[in-house]
Image (cartoon, rainbow, N blue to C red):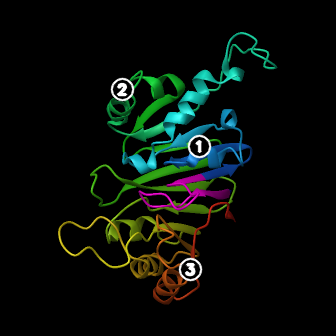
């Protein structure tokens, strides 16, 4: 299994960066995990968008799904996707239509977003939309995908696990969350934990929704993760500081993700 970082920004993008998005590949099958702002263009450097087999969305905050909109426009309007010849493209009776796995309520949210300026069924036309329950297990090629709810500002927020049927390792993606035993238990003994580290310090008041680099390292240590990588973190936070805080809590080196980073499991 190969994991490529496409975007690791929080809800506002790094300079030249992208929000949450990760390409997971095994045995010729390509899955896009989250599709935040800027991810579609980044993804095209690594895989042709018509060759993406499935998209999995962790939760319905815009910075984790908004680039489904340009992705959908490509799938519907690109010359190669048309039924008749256009320029050098011969026309096709079988345009690409990836499966889109998203949480319950996704269709309503997507329609509300795209309907603000165009056809409200844009995403449903471009993708084969399937809303999952948190207890579902998906089989995508040789990969098995599981979900587990984690506490965040949006109730239906899910950590996502990819495991290989071919002995190729296990990936756990925490999505967005406050400090939580739920993620620690779900990620137990994972090979690679992509864990958010949004905050320079805990929220001052109110309900928590994110964690700090030190808390990320502590979560990874308690989960006994083999490797931990910080994601959902801004380039306005000092990388060395974040890595130092997380590494001290984890007990081993922890790196901040960078676009284009590749992890083989």
| SS assignment at label 1 | helix
What is the number of the mark on residue 254?
3
On the rendered structure, is 201 left or right of 99? Answer: left
Task: Indicate whether residue 10 is drawn in magenta.
Answer: yes
For marks 2 and 1, the one nearer the N-term is 1
Q: Residue furthest top?
A: 84
Residue range in magenta is 2-22
Image point (35%, 52%), residue name:
157
Residue 47, compared with residue 172, is above or below; it is above
Which label sits in the foreground, 1 or 3? 1
Which quadrant of the figure has residue 216?
A: bottom left
Report the number of discs: 3
Residue at point 68% right, 11% down? 83
Question: Residue 40: which numbered mark, if any?
Answer: 1
- Residue identified by numbered label 2: 115
Depicted 81 relative to depicted 19: above or below = above
N-terminal label among 1 and 3: 1
Tag 2: Cα neighbours inside 10 Å, few (<14), some, or many (≥20)?
Answer: few
């Amino acid at each position: 299994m190969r994991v490529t970082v496409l975007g690791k920004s929080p809800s506002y993008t790094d300079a030249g960066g992208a929000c949450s998005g990760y390409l997971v590949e095994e045995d010729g099958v390509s899955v896009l995990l989250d599709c935040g702002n800027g991810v579609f263009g980044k993804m095209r450097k690594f895989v042709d968008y018509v060759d993406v087999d499935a998209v999995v969305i962790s939760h319905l905050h815009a910075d984790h799904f908004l680039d489904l909109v340009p992705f959908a426009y490509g799938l519907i309007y690109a010359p190669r996707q048309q039924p008749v010849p256009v320029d050098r493209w011969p026309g096709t009776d079988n345009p690409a239509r990836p499966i889109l796995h998203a949480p319950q309520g996704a269709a309503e949210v997507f329609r509300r977003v795209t309907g603000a300026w165009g056809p409200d069924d844009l995403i449903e036309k471009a993708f084969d939309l399937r809303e999952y329950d948190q207890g579902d297990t998906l089989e995508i090629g040789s990969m098995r995908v599981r979900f587990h709810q984690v506490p965040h500002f949006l109730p239906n927020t899910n950590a996502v696990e990819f495991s290989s049927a071919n002995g190729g390792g296990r990936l756990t993606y925490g999505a967005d969350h406050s400090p939580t035993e739920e993620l620690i238990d779900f990620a137990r003994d994972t090979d690679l934990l992509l864990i958010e580290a949004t905050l320079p310090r805990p929220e001052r008041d109110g309900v928590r929704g994110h964690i700090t680099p030190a808390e990320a390292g502590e979560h990874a240590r308690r989960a006994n993760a083999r490797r931990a990588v910080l994601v959902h973190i801004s380039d306005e936070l000092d990388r060395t500081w974040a890595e130092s805080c997380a590494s001290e809590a984890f007990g081993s080196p922890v790196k901040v993700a960078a676009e284009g980073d590749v992890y083989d499991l």
